[in-house]
Every structure is written in C-alpha cells, then in structure tokens.
C-alpha cells in the first residue's frame, strides 16, 4: 500500500469516528470559550470579607469605612466573634476575616502598636494578596491621618507634614501581569495544556481503537501499510489540525481575552510546531500501548492536574521535589509551557528557551521510535496467530 492510499485511509478513519472528531475539533473550540469565563473579570476587586470589631470605637469604624472604600475589598458582614467569621469563611460566604482588637483606640493614644489580624484563604494567591493590599491601604491611610494630625498640632505646616510622612511616592509597574489578574498567567498556560491533552486523547482513542481491531484480526489498511507510512500520515493530519488550533488560541483567543503577546511570531510558531510534533510522537507511543479506545480519555483527563502543578507556573519548580520535576520533563507539556510562556508572556529571546526546545526535539524523536517498535511488535503479534 502506497503512502497516498495510507493517508486516505487514515483520514477516513479519523473523520468517520465521531468520538475523535468531537474531541479534536469541537472540544478545542469549546474549551477556548468555556475555560476562561471564571477569569473574565480581570482585576481582583470587591473581595467579600467579614470584620470582627472588638473595639467599637470611632477609630475602628473609620478603619472599617476605609476598608470598604478600597477597590479590593467589600465588607460583606460584621461578626461579633471570630468563630462566626470562621464559620462563614469555611462555608465560602467570605474570602477573608479582619479582626480589630479590643482597646485599639486606647493603645493608639498610648503610642502602642496594636495588631490588626487578617485571616484569608491562602490557596487563592491573588485573592489573598488583594485582601492584604486592601487592608494595608486602609491601615496606612488611617496611620497617615494620625501622624499628619499630630504634626499639625505642633504647628507644622500642612505641606511639610505631608512631606515628612511620605517623602517619596512609590510608582509600582507590573512588567508582565499588568492587571494583576489570573487571565495573564493562568489562561495562556492552560491553553497549551488543553492542546496537549486533547491531542493526546485523540491519538489515544485512535491508537487504542486500532489495537482492538488488530486483536480481532480485522483486515484493514493497518494490516498491510508500513508502520512509517501510517505514522507519517497520522502526524501530518494531526499536526495540520492542531497547528490551526494553535493559531486560533494564540491569535483570536488571546486578543479576545486581552492576553499580552510579546513573542516574535517566527519564534512562537517555530517553538509551537515542535511542541505539536513532540506531543504527537508521545500520543502515538501512548496510543500504541492502549489495549482499547476507552482507556485514553480517563487517563489523560486525570493526568491534567498533576501536569499543571508540576509545570512550574502555578507552583514554583524550586519548591517541587527534584524527582517530580525530572519525571514531569518526560511529558511534552512541561517544556512547552515553560518555553511558550517565556516567549509570549515574558518576551524572552529564542536563545533563552533553547533548553526547552531541545527537550521537545529529543522527545519527538525518542517517542516516535518507541511508538514505531511497539506498534510493529503488536501488529506482528496479533496477525501471526
């Protein structure tokens, strides 16, 4: 069987399989709109909190007013005790608790330093940071009022009092995540993971299905076509489809959700294409191992979270056990996420991601060779009986 006939048979097998078509076409497009919706509100603002005011003084009420006035915080409720506030936090009615201690006003008058306690859900990094930032703004604003007021009582001119309290202004500029939002750092990485996982699921369903047919000794093209022709045809088909998906994600989807694009287009496409080749090779290898088509979907779906947390964009690589990090490098998504985020979100030169690119090149070759031998062995095993 020549290469053209093999290609036609592969194309027919893929596009007459409803599960594969829905997965690799509809699934990719659907995810591009559904996944980012929870993060569509780019800025972290109006975080619901509870305030426990044990002091109940005019100063504590002023601080609570300032808290509610910040962009980050919404004082949703006032609780009489920490226990009530903790219960609301555990029930997810609020995201944080601010506790103003008893004798707060008195301690300030005695030039003591009372402590305002903050409790928040640390598993949501930006929410936690937003609560801290909003609370600090409120406290510092009130502190400034007190200090400036004391200076005015000493006959210090207003301008000089303000200058002595804040001799310089801080101008904070976020280099990459300009809006301090989930959108900028989560969605680009997850888009890469979505392409990776859906590509693997599609190839896994196809590979597992062919193994089922060969086990039943079906007289299909996969019995006669040479292995390299089958794999070349499959690689061309899936690479073409997912290259278009990649352009859609990095083009329209990034533009639609306002995600920063800093990469040189040539570098981005060069790296992205190698990511697709490495993932296809990995998918061919995994698909050749599956005994049935139903295995692929649960395996790759359940592996998504471990990949996310070992890829280094949510949890720092330095904080991971080295063994987990090295194991994660066996998966194309890890190097792809690191390289593409560095290029597209951090504006890195291609030379800065050459290590990740090299790993993808090695994976593309090694997994293709492994897939070749596994598929050839299984075909010989099934049809020689």
Image (cartoon, rainbow, N blue to C red):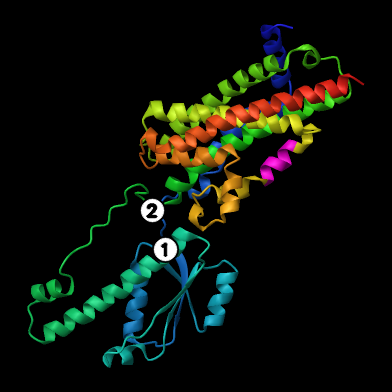
Helix, strand or loop: magenta stretch = helix
Q: Which residues are magenta?
A: 296-302
Q: Which residue is mark 2?
A: 180
Q: Which residue is mark 1?
A: 129
Question: Does 178 sit left or right of 330 as displayed?
Answer: left
Q: Is residue 45 above or below residue 80?
A: above
The quadrant in which the C terminus is found is top right
Q: CA distance from mark 1 to mark 2?
A: 10 Å
Describe the element under mark 1 as helix, strand or loop.
Answer: helix
Q: Position of residue 189 (x, y in %)?
A: 50, 42
**Contact flag, marks 1 and 2 (Cβ < 8 Å):** yes
The reply to whether residue 195 is visible in this rendering is yes
Numbered tag placed on residue 364 in the rendering? none
At a point 47% along the width and 70% down the height, the residue shown is 49
- On the image, which quarter does residue 300 sit in? top right
Q: Position of residue 325 (x, y in %)?
A: 56, 49
The reply to whether residue 258 is visible in this rendering is no
Question: Does 288 sit left or right of 81 as displayed?
Answer: right
Question: Does 50 sit left or right of 215 as displayed?
Answer: left
At a point 38% along the width and 62% down the height, the residue shown is 72
At a point 53% along the width and 43% down the height, the residue shown is 190
Q: Is residue 16 magenta?
A: no
């Amino acid at each position: 069987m020549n290469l053209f006939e093999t290609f036609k048979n592969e194309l027919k097998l893929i596009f007459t399989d409803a599960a594969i078509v829905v997965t690799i076409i509809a699934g990719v497009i659907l995810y591009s709109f559904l996944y980012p919706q929870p993060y569509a509100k780019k800025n972290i603002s109006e975080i619901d909190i509870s305030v426990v005011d044990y002091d109940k003084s005019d100063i504590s009420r002023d601080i609570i007013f300032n808290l509610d006035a910040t962009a980050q915080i919404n004082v949703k409720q006032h609780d009489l005790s920490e226990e009530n506030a903790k219960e609301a936090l555990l029930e997810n009615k609020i995201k944080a608790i601010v506790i103003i201690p008893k004798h707060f006003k008195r301690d300030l008058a005695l030039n003591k330093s009372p402590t305002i306690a903050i409790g928040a859900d640390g598993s949501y990094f930006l929410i936690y940071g937003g609560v801290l930032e909003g609370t600090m703004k409120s406290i510092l604003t009130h502190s400034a009022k007190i200090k400036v007021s004391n200076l005015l009582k000493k006959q210090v001119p207003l301008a000089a009092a303000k200058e002595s309290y804040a001799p310089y202004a801080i101008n904070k500029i976020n280099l990459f995540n300009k809006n301090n939002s989930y959108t900028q750092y989560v969605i680009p990485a997850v888009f890469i993971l979505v392409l990776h996982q859906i590509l693997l699921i599609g190839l896994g369903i196809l590979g597992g299905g062919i193994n089922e047919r060969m086990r039943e000794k079906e007289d299909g093209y996969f019995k006669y076509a040479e292995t390299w022709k089958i794999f070349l045809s499959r690689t061309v088909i899936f690479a073409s489809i997912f290259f278009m998906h990649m352009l859609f994600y990095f083009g329209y989807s990034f533009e639609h959700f306002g995600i920063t694009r800093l990469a040189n287009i040539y570098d981005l496409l060069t790296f992205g294409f190698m990511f697709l080749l490495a993932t296809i090779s990995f998918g061919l290898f995994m698909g050749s191992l599956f005994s049935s088509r139903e295995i692929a979907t649960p395996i790759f779906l359940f592996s998504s979270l471990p990949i996310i947390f070992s890829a280094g964009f949510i949890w720092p690589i330095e904080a991971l056990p080295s063994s987990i990090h090295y194991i994660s490098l066996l998966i194309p998504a890890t190097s792809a996420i690191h390289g593409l985020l560095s290029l597209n979100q951090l504006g890195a030169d291609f030379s800065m991601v050459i290590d990740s690119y090299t790993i993808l090149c090695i994976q593309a070759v090694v997994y293709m060779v492994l897939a070749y031998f596994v598929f050839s062995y299984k075909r010989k095993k099934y049809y020689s009986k």
